[in-house]
Each structure stands twice: as structure tokens, then as C-alpha cells.
Image: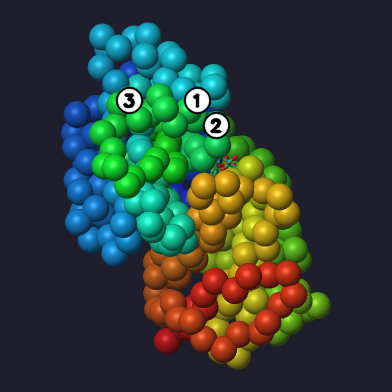
Amino acid sequence: METHQSIIETMKIRTSVRTYDGEAIAVETLEKLNERLRAINAATTIKARFVISEMKDTDGNAVKKLGTYGVITGAKTYLVGIIDQSETDAVQFGYLFESIVLYATRLGLGTCWLGGTFNHEDFKKIVRLGESEKIVIVSPVGYRKDRTTLLEGIMRTMVKANNRKPWTELFFNQDKTQALDEERAGEYAIPLEMVRLAPSASNKQPWRVLHSDTGFHFYLCRTKGYGLASYDVQMNDLGIAKYHFETAANELGLSGTWVNTDHPIVEAWEYVTSWQGR
Ligand SMILES: Cc1cc2nc3c(=O)[nH]c(=O)nc-3n(C[C@H](O)[C@H](O)[C@H](O)COP(=O)(O)O)c2cc1C
């Protein structure tokens, strides 16, 4: 069932789901998800593709064993994110995968980004890869066990907000010494709040946004010694943040574009991109 939930509401209710009820996804719902993947795969400008891998009932054992080191239980179906070894744009990959995650949320399905706790070899057995391809992200997709009631959903949303860094650590005005509060952010307060609620690897929340006269500048504040083994998972987090900011802004009627433009240089932060409102 596709709800007509707004994208902002969808971002608020999405949380990582790690326990599934084992039911197959309804045929019509799965077809919608597949349709979305086909559209994304056809349009993408990076060397990446996204597939759905469904385990059949006869694979009962495989379902149980499929390598997530016990982190995920009861999931039969996985979204699998594949990138070419030569592709370096983890930002765009994260952007696209999050668009799929939120679409699945809208369809009433649970998801959980997995960049670390999955066994690559196991997934390679169920997805046919080209020679130069690798799997970098997977996510179970299906029905949450004990589907939440509305009240639970609201409670989880509040818990999530508590698990995020405060505005003072994430959003700045002109330079790193001045916090950007919700009042000063004005019509962009909600898009920024959607960045704050975004999922990130190990919940590190490495995104930083600095507002200046030339726009909202997005930076990566890397966690030392984290990630980077074979895929830049924190740049991927910046792509998620971009998707949240842009789609929330668009839903509120705030148009703009992503540009690489003049931006303040901030020590220890890597510049990624800037949003210029029109
Ligand atoms: C790129 C990325 C990789 C992640 N990898 C894992 C993982 O390997 N295992 C896991 O249990 N959760 C993983 N997560 C889920 C995060 O831990 C989760 O999004 C974060 O704690 C915030 O919680 P929420 O998604 O419920 O809002 C990952 C999330 C992202 C965005």
C-alpha cells in the first residue's frame, strides 16, 4: 500500500528496522519498488545500480544464514547497492540509495542501511556481479515484526530526535563559532531538521552545514580512523543529507540548486557542496 505521506513526514517516521515478520512483500508493492529501481538505474549518472534480491521460501536456511551476522532477523528481501570499482562518487550513491529507502518507507516497508554488518561473499552468491562491480550497501526490506501502532511510531520519532546531535553541533552561521538556530534558519529550519534526522553510518552524523551569504554549505567532519576501507561511507552519509535537505526544501516550495561555489574554508571539515536558493 502506498501512502500519500509527505516526504517530510516519511523522514520523521523512518527508523532502522532490524526485526522482520518473515512475510513476503505484497506483489503489487514489490512491483512498485522494482519500478522505482528501474527508473533510478535508467537515469543514474554514476556507475552504480540497485537491485532487489528476493529469497524464495525453499531457501529457508539461506534466509536465516544470509550474512548479516545476526543483526537482521526475519528478512527475505534485500535491496542491494552495487557500484563499479572505478566509481568514486559515494555522495551520489548515498543520495540514490536513500531515495529508495524513503520510497520503501512510504510503501509501508521497513529498511536498515547496512554498510558494515553484512557478509559480502554471501550476497555475491545471490546477486550476479560484473567483473568490476562490488556490493557496498545492502538493506533488508519488508514488514517490521509487530508492526508499530501510530503511538509507537510517534514515540520512536521522539527517541530518534534524542539520539541526534543538537543544532548547535551541526549548523552554523557565517563561521564555525556562531550557531545557526531555528529562528535564524527561517524557512530552511525544516530542511535542516531533516538533515539532523537522517540516518548515518554508526549514527556518527558527520554532516555540518554552514550558512553564509552565498548559500548553505555542506561539509564532512570525518570521524578519525572510521570507514574508508573500500568505500567512503561518510561521504555516502553526505549524500543522504543532501537528499533530505533538497526534497524537504522542494516539498516546502523552496527551490534551489546544488553548486560548487565560494565557501568558507573550515579547518578539519571537507567541503562537499552548496545549496543556493532561487
Ligand atoms: C551508510 C550507513 C551504513 C550503516 N551500516 C549499518 C550496519 O552495518 N549495521 C547496522 O546495524 N546498522 C547500520 N546502519 C544504520 C545506522 O546505525 C542507523 O541509521 C543510525 O544508528 C540511526 O538510527 P535510525 O536509522 O534508526 O534513525 C548504517 C547506516 C548508514 C547510513
Alpha carbon distance from label 1 to label 2: 5 Å
Of circles 2 and 3, the one toward us is 3
Which structural element holds mark 2? loop
Amino acid type, label 2: Thr
Count of number-bearing discs: 3
Residue position for label 2: 117
Question: In the image, what residue occupies the spot 49% across and 82% down?
Answer: 260
Q: Decide: is 183 above or below 166.
A: below
Question: In front: mark 1 or mark 3?
Answer: 3
Query: Split into 4 quadrants, where in the image is the C terminus?
Result: bottom left
Q: Residue at x 73, y 54 (%)?
A: 224
Point out residue 167 in the picture as x, y percentages from the top left corner.
71, 64
**Residue labelled with disc 3:** 125
Q: Is residue 275 above or below residue 73?
A: below
* Residue situated in front as seen by the camera: 43 or 224: 224
Query: Mark 2 near ligand 1 (CB under 8 Å)?
Result: yes
Q: Residues within 10 Å of mark 2 (few under 14, many from 20)?
A: some
Q: Residue furthest front?
A: 131
Using residue 138 as the reference point, say whether residue 274 is left or right of it: right
Instruction: Give the Cα distance between marks 2 and 3.
Output: 17 Å
Using the rendered image of the protein, determine whether residue 62 is visible from the camera's viewpoint: yes
Left/right placement of residue 164 relative to residue 111 reads right
Residue 160 versus residue 212: which sits nearer the camera? Answer: 212
Residue matched to label 1: 68
Respond yes or no on whether mark 1 lies under 8 Å from ligand 1.
Answer: yes
Determine crowd level at label 3: few under 14, some 14-19, many 20+ residues with C-alpha closer than 10 A. Answer: few
Q: Quarter containing ligand 1?
A: top right
Residue 217 higher or lower than 242, as above or below? below
Q: Are marks 1 and 2 in contact (CB under 8 Å)?
A: yes
Depicted 247 relative to depicted 75: above or below: below
Image quadrant occupied by the N terminus: top left
Amino acid type at image mark 3? Lys
